[in-house]
Image (tube, rainbow, N blue to C red):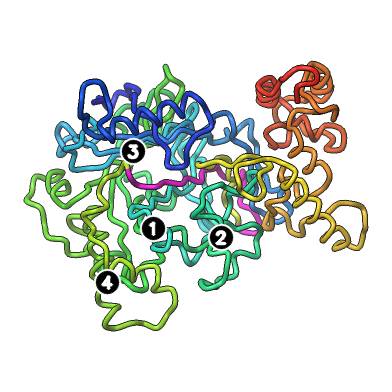
Amino acid sequence: MTKLSAKGSAPTHVDRSRFGSRHPVLAGAVLVCVALVLGISRGGTVAAAPSVTVADSGDDAAPRRTDPGGDGPFDSDLHRLIELREMIIGKWAPDDPEADIFVGTFANSGKFFRLDLVLDKLVNPPGPTGLVYFEPFRYGDHPIFGFVEIDMDQDVETGGELNAPQYRYLGNIVRFGGKPEIADFQDRVALNASAFDGDFLTAPFVDRHGEEFHLALLGSEFTSGDIEEVLGDSDTIFEEGETWQINAPFFHRAHGYEPFSLATGGAHAGEYAPACTLQFQHDAGAEVTYVSLVFPLKNQGAGLMVGEPPEPDNGDPSDHASVKEGLVDLHDSAVFLDSFPTGLPEEAIITEWMNKDPSDFLNPTQWEITALLGTSYTVMDPAGEYFVWTDVVPDVRRGDVNGDDEIDLQDQQLIQQYIADYDSADGLADGRAELVEFATDFSVFDVNHDGVVEDLDVMLVSLPGDLNDDGDVDLSDFASFSVCFSGSGVPYSPLECGLADMDADGDVDLRDMRRLVDMLTGPGTG
């Protein structure tokens, strides 16, 4: 059992990921968790762990612009790339829910769930992004934006984002160099911008992620008056060692349910987006920022926060609100739709809840989570795009364009076939397939995300790190790399140094050097 106080003691948890792990240390941690869940230990039966950790590979953040042309104003030196180290989720028992819900322990008896995003270095709350107020850096130079989607019933057919899937995981994951190996997502990932056709019935089903709830990291959800500086100097800038708690509706039920939901009390019919508290806490010693959400699993927990008896599950997020209440409304709404169907095909994302018991889905360690995180353009983009995505979880294997967890000849052939099919689309037969209106458009075959599918993308698949194309990664490649080394934020010649940009972030710097060192195999050992 792990204690986490408002003063920032770093938690230690059992590692688990629904998506598996190729890293030997993480794989071992997954086995430990499985042993705990199954009660396999020398001491006999052991209770399931109250929290789990989904780890990211680390040091893999790279900018992915979304504006036409992919040249929107963004300064990665001034505004740090948002990088996720891990996500921790589990049942949470606050010591005193009325005083501070963030002081307590992960425990199977907890009436709340806690989600921690552990982010590299100092990360601050997002400022507003919009036509009237565009101040993304209102609270500091390194704001976090994005969405963490939670599939609570482990059913990809139920739940989703119907109106703006281009801002979610399925709509952006291939920008990071490949297709995820997750079986449930194989026919749902946007392989290019044509996936956003606004048609619920056509593949790929990018609007049908399966989420029940999501954490929306958006500056539009709160104002400065919603912030309590638990530890800080009250200058409205989130700085090292500070702790802020922000009360606002960050935790939304999936918006795709709203046209079919009986919920009342929200900003509009069917909405379930209750007020909650999000904590930003910087640990100067560990050089990480925790972004934490604690929220009631049942209305019993909501009552404990205000010292009241729990109210019934009434589908009204403006009074006592909880995960179960939001799920109960889905069940009740599905029963209603069974008798009074709308005739709209989109209601399919809720109708299966008629046969589900909400109480079966209140174990956070079994929830399936995806995250899409990023920062903001320096100034408002003329096309109205606000976000530069930088990190995703679960990640993809760069170059695995068919999502089979292998980087092999088949991936190379698929890229080559794409080049052959679209080479002359721009009127030139030059062995290059340019993406029109990149980066509004994108392609899974554009492995380095530079707006062109070409031989360089094929070479990146063949043997990453083999800069001289001799079939191995050795000191000769390191010598070639040193010629291309430009430093953070300094562009290079793609023709001469494209292979040296190991993280596809537009420069050749120390991050790329670390990756190349990890890939060194020696002469003749490709």
Of residues 491 and 202, the one drawn nearer to the viewer in this rendering = 202
Instruction: Indicate whether 451 appears above or below 98.
Output: below
Of residues 401 and 148, the one drawn nearer to the viewer in this rendering = 401
Question: Is residue 191 left or right of 15 when viewed as pictured?
Answer: right
Within 10 Å of the Cα at label 4, are there few (<14), some (14-19), or many (20+) other Cα atoms? many
Quarter location, residue 429: bottom right
Instruction: Please provide percent x and percent y for residue 385.
Output: 60, 55
Within 10 Å of the Cα at label 3, are there few (<14), some (14-19), or many (20+) other Cα atoms? many
* Disc 4 to disc 3, C-alpha distance: 28 Å
Q: Nearer the viewer, mark 4 or mark 2?
A: 2
Q: Earlier in the sequence, mark 4 or mark 2?
A: 2
Instruction: Please provide percent x and percent y for residue 126.
Output: 46, 43
Q: How many marks?
A: 4
Give amino acid for label 1. Answer: Asp
Residue 155: which numbered mark, if any? 1
Q: Earlier in the sequence, mark 2 or mark 3?
A: 3
Tell me the magenta residue range.
Answer: 366-384
Q: Earlier in the sequence, mark 2 or mark 1?
A: 1
**Which of the image's four quarters has the C terminus?**
top right
- SS category of the residue bearing label 4: helix
**Disc 3: which residue:** 89
Q: Answer yes or no: do the residues labelled 2 and 3 have beta carbons within 8 Å?
A: no
Give amino acid for label 3. Answer: Ile
